Amino acid sequence: MDTSKTPPEGRVGSKKPRLTAMERLAIETGLDAGKTPYAIARELGRPPKTVMREIRGRAVESDKGAVGRVNNRCAHRYECTRRDVCKACYQRRSMQCKFCRQCNSHCPDYIEDRCARLESSPFVCNGCKDRNRCTLRKRFYRNGPATENYREVLVESRRGANVTEAELLKFDKLLYRLTKNGQSVHAAVVNNPELFTVSEKTLYRYIDGGLLSTKNGDLPRKCKLKPRKGKGEEHKVDKKCRIGRTWDDYLKFVAENPGLPLTEMDTVEGTKGGKVLLTLMFMPYCFMLAFLLDEKTAANVSAAFSMIRDKLVGKFGKDAGLAMMTELFFVIVTDNGTEFTLPDEIEKDCEGNKVANLFYANPGASYQKPHVERNHEFIRLVLPKGSHYFLPTSFDSLTQDDVDLMMSHINSYVREASGDKPPYDLMTRKFGVEFAELFNIRRIPANDVVLKPSLLGIEQKVRPEILKATDPENNTK
């Protein structure tokens, strides 16, 4: 393993060196032995706050249950007598919901029971004598994930565009107007030094990264230069966008505001640099909207939300439209993609009032927004990646009407988890048929639902090597 590029874990001569991997291993070992964070800090010669901050900040959640026990985490499970919450209980009338593994995700009165050990020292389940019998959600401190998280934080702090959203918007409009008039980036910076908070070279990098309204096509000389070979870099509009919007902040927000509907957001990419699909999954209805974006940029995502807001206000009036906007997007969970790094543009309405709360899942934790990830599989049935077929992986030939037709069929497909009801019926029961019609989504009869490329007229031609491999005449032996 090459350690030459590994960031140092301690600063030589620093008054407050960072924790090392050996110290994190000692913390894990001490917690497993039942020691308190104070005792561990005394052994390491560290302040107790440093050790407690490390444990609380880098502990990972575990969905592990207990062998031979029903994984029911409802606070009412001991006195509950309900029998008809989910389909499994309905089929077996003799079984109460508190003995069912599915009722937690269906019961409207469900309140998750949290272990008091996680709210006070030691904040984790390491060393707990009851953890093999406990069915509640657990948290563990492990040296490996903690060290990996530390390195990711170091790398993340040095990645992206070092500019705030306000600074970017300040000079974006002016630069776009000047370059459209034939001026160069250099001339724009020289003539307006007070507006540009970044260097000329940085501006070119932002243009290449798609952060600005100015594109390479607006710079004549830029188009004549041969691009260098190399991996493209993703730039975040605002490096501080995750502050107050992390997964831990989401869990705290949900605990303080239980029962709120959730919207999961993601993108589906065709080819690099081409059109993408912005997907919005409304829970618990399993209803999804998809919008075709020209580029995978934060500006295009913000424009999509502005379009949604304008449609709702135009259809239902200002007060009712903004109220519906708040109900639909009050809690949003998405990933850490650069296209979602303009959170203020998503959270605020046209008057600057906050109507939504956006949170970011942990890096690589797609299971924290499982519903939208699972629904993408239906999209890939209609728009496969083409690894085995001559199919267009690019979305550039699609139109929004094609996307709306695809989503009409997907939303009309029955789901077992929803009691064999299609998401269209559940969503329109809550928000009315007018809401679906506003986004060109219609109800498709159950027997007419198509989840194949032929829905959009895509011809499915199998590659010759696959035909040869599956041809019976070539398999005589």
Image: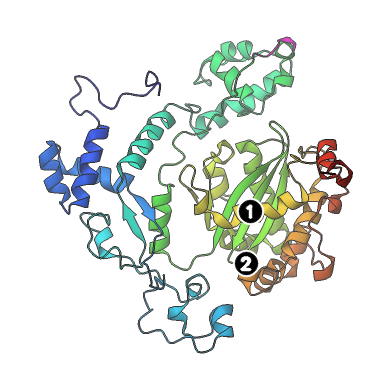
Tell me residue 304's x, y (percent).
Answer: 67, 46
Please state which amino acid type lies under the numbered disc 2: Tyr
Q: Position of residue 461 (x, y in %)?
A: 87, 42
Q: Mark 2 points at which residue?
A: 285
Position of residue 168 in the picture relative to residue 173 (left or right): left
Q: Quadrant of residue 445?
A: bottom right
Find residue 53 and report its image quarter. top left
236, 381: nearer the viewer: 381
Residue wearing tag 1? 280
Magenta segment, prevailing SS (helix, strand or loop): loop
Q: Read off the magenta span.
A: 224-228
Residue 94 lies left or right of residue 232; in this view the side is: left
State whether residue 357 appears in this view: no
Q: Is residue 98 visible?
A: yes
State the image coordinates of residue 108 (x, y, percent, origin top left). 50, 75
Q: In which quarter of the image is the C terminus?
A: top right
Q: Which of 144 and 468 is in front in this view?
A: 468
Disc 1 residue type (three-letter): Leu
- Determine whether the residue tagged by mark 1 lies in a helix, strand or loop: strand
* Magenta-drawn stretch contains 225: yes
Residue at 80 percent of width and 70 percent of height: 446
Residue sitting at the far bottom: 94
| Front residue (pair 338, 368) | 368
Q: Earlier in the sequence, mark 1 or mark 2?
A: 1
Picture layout, residue 361 above or below residue 182: below
Image x and y of residue 424, in percent: 71, 67
Q: Residue at x 21, y 54 (%)?
A: 122
Q: What element carries label 2?
A: loop
**Label 2 neighbour load within 10 Å: few <14, some 14-19, many 20+:** many
